[in-house]
Amino acid sequence: MRKLLGILCAVFCLTGCAGLKEVYLYNTLSTEEWNDRQREKALLADFNSACTIYQADKPVNTSLTYTQFLTDLSAKLKEEGNEIVGAANQNMVLHRVVYEALNQRIYQLKTLLPRYQKFNEQSCYQNLKNQLQTMISMQNTVCQNAWNYEKKQFVSKTGAELLPEGDTVVSVSNPKKGIMYSLEEAQVFQNTKGGILVRGNNGKIRFVATANIYADDEYLNGFAVYTGITSYITTLKTNKTVYAFKEIPASKYKSIYDKLLFHPTSNAGTCSPSRNVDYAEIRQAFKTTASSFVENWGEEKISSDTKVARTYYSPRDFGSIRERSLADWYGGVTEATLEKPEAKNGVLENINTFFLQKE
């Protein structure tokens, strides 16, 4: 018996308490229990890694203002060789890039925090949660300010306002003056004095004043503004009253419309971009740019004479392959290996650090 105790003591000295415990558990737990234990250890290691990467040992500065945030961020970007053009609050490309950078961190935390729920009493978890909340709030503030700025610029340039949701010339039931309505789905069915009569798929007829000549059955594009009510004589010699619009020349709105990054997609208190920025826009919005910065935060333009398709999010908004695999793991893939959050370099990649209290 004494010899056995001596052997155990020797093993203890060689492997240490933790190692001896692992050997004991490995030999006494069932395969399922052992695998559960390994997953729990991996989860704890992942949690601790996230705390380090997100600097969650520091409390969150919940009083950071929009102006101070843009000022601090612009200064840090300049240090990295990416100096913006003009004032930060008027640089819409900066706002779009910032929105996307925030979106990446927000998505990551939204993905990770539910998995860490069992650690919710730890200060690290609470700080991660506060980071998420402050970044969501700032993201919406950045978007709303950009939306308001673009709206003001657009109205100043064109004299009319775009609507967030798409009433068109042929669908609107109660048109208002000072609004630009899309000519989408408006099909020419008759040229008349001073313009054309168009018809929608819903059968509604509208008059559009225009200096252009269109072929019958042609579909229009662009915008028109409401001007009032007019009447025309049908082929059956009856009088018909319809809403009247005036086509807006593309030269009046296209130059500013093609630059819109936020307006007019947002409504009902929500805010989201209309599209991402391309390489050329980043180079124009920054005095100097590192090539990696342009490639990481811009997209190649599809065509020099075709507007980039408007999408609400870039593929990067949904995280890397690593982050998507984490989401799958959280969804119930029991045999997957838990990946640790990935540390990244760069101001925008670590945008959450702007929301930490300074020492």
Image (cartoon, helix red, strand yellow):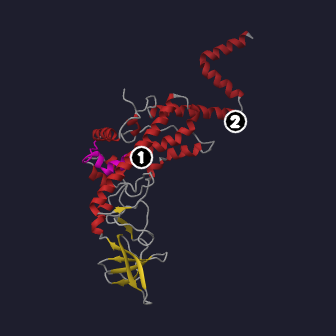
Note whether 43 is above or below 190 in the view shown: above
Q: Which tag, 1 or 2, sits closer to the chain's start?
A: 2
Inspect the image, locate mark 2, and give the three-letter code of the amino acid beneath it: Glu
Image point 72% across, 9% down: which residue? 2
Q: Any mark on residue 240, and which?
A: none
Asked which quadrant contains residue 172, the reply is bottom left
Where are the magenta residues, as a range?
A: 81-102
Residue 91 within the segment the image draws in magenta: yes
In-front residue for pair 163/18: 163
Inspect the image, locate mark 1, and give the three-letter code of the amino acid beneath it: Asn
Is residue 149 among the parts visible in the rendering? yes
Specify the quadrant that holds the C terminus.
top left
Question: Residue 298 at what x, y percent from top left?
Answer: 36, 52
Residue 293 within the segment the image draws in magenta: no
Identify the residue position indicated by label 1 in the image.
140
Q: Is 266 positioned to the left or the right of 6 in the image?
A: left
SS class of the residue under badge 2? helix
SS class of the residue under badge 1? helix
Q: Any mark on residue 32, and which?
A: 2
